[in-house]
Image (spheres, grey):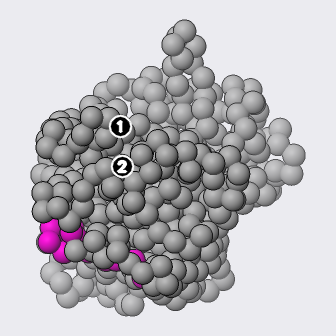
Amino acid sequence: MNLSGAGAQARPADRPGVSSGSVASDQIRGAYSLIVVANRLPASQVVQPDGKVEWQPSPGGLVTALEPVMRASAGAWVGWSGSPGPAPEPFDADGVRLVPVELSDQDVEMFYEGFSNGTLWPLYHDVIAPPQFHRHWWEAYCAVNERFAQAAAGQAAQGATVWVHDYQLQLVPALLRQRRPDLRIGFFNHIPFPGYEIFAQLPWRRQIVEGLLGADVVGFQRRADVTNFLRACRRAAGARTSGGIVRVPERADGGERDGSGEVGASKAQGRRVSAACFPISIDSAAFGELARREDVRARSRQIRQELGDPQVLLLAVDRLDYTKGILHRLRAYEELLDEGRLAPPESVFVQVAAPSRERVLEYQSLREDVEAVVGRINGEHATLGQPAVHYLRHSYPREEMAALYMAADVMVVTPLRDGMNLVAKEYVACRQDELGALVLSEFTGAADELGSAFLVNPHDIEQTKDAIMRAVQVAPSQARRRMRSLRKRVRIFDVDRWATDFLRALNGPDPDSHSVGSRLHEG
Ligand code: F6P
């Protein structure tokens, strides 16, 4: 994303090819026909060492997938700049309108770190960490969701399509529909949607479900998420469901219903909302191109050299998050070393752990625990100049990641729960040599699609150890067979396909067109 225009003031009406239509002016709130609403903008504000504030693009699959379609259809992106404080003015970047939403210091603490990442994140990831329920966090969540809904309503042209993303903004669909019933509204949840027994812990479960049901299409990563959501619709909001269609009662009066979905004849004939799965993916071709670049290939060879040309290079890449199973994985590796099944310097393990949500207590404790375990393993098994675990608490540019993926013999992706896990797909997309092996947790969305990986239950340390050893020792012919099948899946179902399928389901003439998305993604 080119940010050269950042800061320039461009009003929607100035944009070529954008018409405000013929609706009365008090009904027109904006001029953009496709609006993405996400917690973060595709660019972040960063304070330089000299105090100057600059915008830096945050390249990611979502931006790559949506940029062309947003450019073609007069798109705007509503989101947070990543810095607390007053929102900068909207500006154009590469033909896309970026509309910053303000988060104060208190919002960051109570909405982002609090309700989003201290309540919803652990709740939706199988309560791996205990979720905290605080009424003032909920109030902040409601207030910030209102702000996002208002910003989106202010940008959308009559009849525009608005695509809302992720758990931070689950109330936005309904808030937006109240303001702008003319809009076509989609919602996509990037993280898992939990089983009802877990979801039901949330004191505000009904409000969350009703917030989501403001959308026309609610998309999830896995079929299991759709099933969980449909059950929550019946149990928490008293809605009737049939297949992937939810009948939203005309007037949700807040009463808890029984599982029968009995809500009375007139209300039961309400609006239809589709729920379906659309597994997200990566820009596979772009990773393929990176992997073909001579400088990236040279860097990949250099990495192996710098690591002492090991016989086996194991790689793990995660955000430093307790859902990623980093401690379980390190334990499995440590036991393999203790048992002499792997031995440095012939075998080397590289753990990249990108810093994340560093002010949240659980993340701080995880970091301490991971660093203690890495220290213990190296204390026991490293030799001078040859660590057993290379622990890198950094984020790296895509080129470096591609070089690491190409260097690794075995990629170990073992989260305890993960909506999708794009690292697994990136690894596969970079292995043009059709070599390398993927050890993958069955609790990732990716496992539904990548059945040719070595699948493991990461809680089962013995099974994880055996899977790592099978991946280390796999015959080249079998490795190739597995990798070819993984690559085929990732090549065909890329992020462009994901976005196209979702938008087609949202805007297609057939109200049941969501089922196309589901069918296309059968693993
Ligand atoms: O996977 C969910 C998600 O919110 C992603 O959209 C995001 O890249 C990641 O977690 C990190 O989130 P944060 O915005 O909290 O840094």
Sequence order check: which comes first, mark 1 or mark 2? Answer: 2
- Residue at image location 29% in from the left, 64% down from the top: 414
Which residues, given as a range, are shown in magenta?
452-465
The residue sitting at the top extreme is 50
Q: Is residue 416 something that shows in the picture?
A: yes
Q: Position of residue 203 (x, y in %)?
A: 15, 56
Quadrant of the rendered image containing residue 484: bottom right
- For label 1, the residue is 393
Residue closest to the eye, 429 or 36 = 429
Left or right, residue 279 beside residue 251: right
Q: Which numbered disc covers residue 350?
A: 2
Q: Residue at x 39, y 26 (%)?
A: 104
Q: Residue at x 75, y 42 (%)?
A: 94
Q: Is residue 493 magenta?
A: no
Picture coordinates of residue 294 (x, y %)?
70, 51
For label 1, count other residues whose C-alpha is less than 10 Å away and answer few (under 14), some (14-19) or many (20+).
Answer: some
What's the distance in space between the residues labelled 1 and 2, CA to CA? Answer: 11 Å
**For the residue marked with disc 2, what is the amino acid?**
Val
- Is the residue under label 2 in contact with that under label 1 (CB below 8 Å)? no
Q: Secondary structure at mark 2?
A: strand
Q: Give the structural element (helix, strand or loop) at label 1.
A: loop
